[in-house]
Image (cartoon, rainbow, N blue to C red):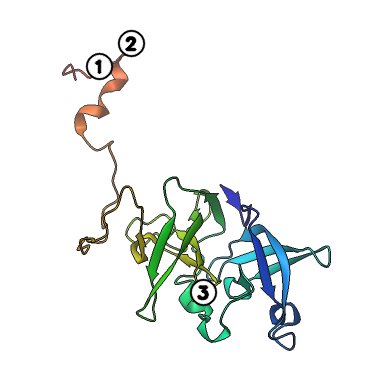
Amino acid sequence: MAFLVHPVPPNPVFVKKEYLYDLKKGHGELTPGIWISVKSVQTKALYFETLLTEYGALFDKLPLSAFVWKKDFNPEDQLPLDVLELWDCFDYNITVVRKPLLGRCEFFGKDKKMHPGEYEFTIDSAHPDHSIIDTNFSELDPEHKSFNIIALDNGQFAAQPNNRVIWRDNSLIPGTLKQPDFKVCSQNYAVETESKWWTVGHTEEWSYKTEDGA
């Protein structure tokens, strides 16, 4: 678990140059780059640090809407940041993983449309320091969300939680899918709740047993 900043897979990207000039100029222009790290600031969008290869410069704090992965995209088909990323960051402590088996997918956006793409990696968060008050939902099971980073067919990148994504796999998943009717988890599961496990302090045996023999 990293605090604030975590390295990410070195995805080649193109940066929309208006984001390099505080949206004041550079519209319609691109410059190549490589993702270096991601920053998680609670209640803000994900920020990506990018190596701008034409300049030899590192540029920090760019949102997902600043990036495309291909040059031949349709400017009329670009999604706003609040569709690309449904939730702001939950905490300052994050980890980055590349989940196995996942690839082709599509997400249901807040624009009520499906947006297809290819899975890249996942950003997840937690609040590990219990000496500091937790003011958000990163460790509350019913509210916790992760960010699945998806390279969309329209050229953009999205960050979507599991419950917004449908996954495709030619070998594992059929062409016709059932409609999920699952409920959001309202539980916080724990196992040290049965009274019989509260009585093992009476023994020093390696394979200790409770007094009732369990």
Instruction: Answer with mark 3 or mark 1, whichever residue precedes in sequence.
Output: 3
Residue 65: where, in percent of width, then height? Answer: 58, 75
Write down the quadrant of residue 59 in the picture: bottom right
The image shows residue 192, relative to residue 136, as above or below, that is: above
Residue placed most toward the observer, 100 or 22: 100
| Image depth: mark 2 or mark 3 in front | 3
The answer to whether any part of residue 206 appears in the image is yes
Q: Residues within 10 Å of mark 1 (few under 14, many from 20)?
A: some
The residue under the point 49% across, 78% down is: 82
Label total for image: 3
Q: Residues within 10 Å of mark 3 (few under 14, many from 20)?
A: some
Q: Secondary structure at mark 2?
A: loop
C-alpha span from label 2 to label 1:
8 Å
The label number, if any, that marks residue 205 in the structure image: 2
Which residue has dot 1 on it? 209
Q: Is residue 125 left or right of residue 72?
A: left
Which residue has dot 3 on it? 154
Q: Secondary structure at mark 1?
A: loop
Residue 7: where, in percent of width, then height? Answer: 64, 52
Residue 146: where, in percent of width, then height? Answer: 44, 58
Q: Secondary structure at mark 3?
A: loop
Residue 102: where, in percent of width, then height? Answer: 42, 51
Q: Mark 2 and 1 residues: CB-CB less than 8 Å, in contact?
A: yes
Q: Quadrant of the C terminus?
A: top left
* Amino acid type, mark 3: Asn
Residue placed most toward the observer, 96 or 93: 96
The answer to whether any part of residue 133 appears in the image is no
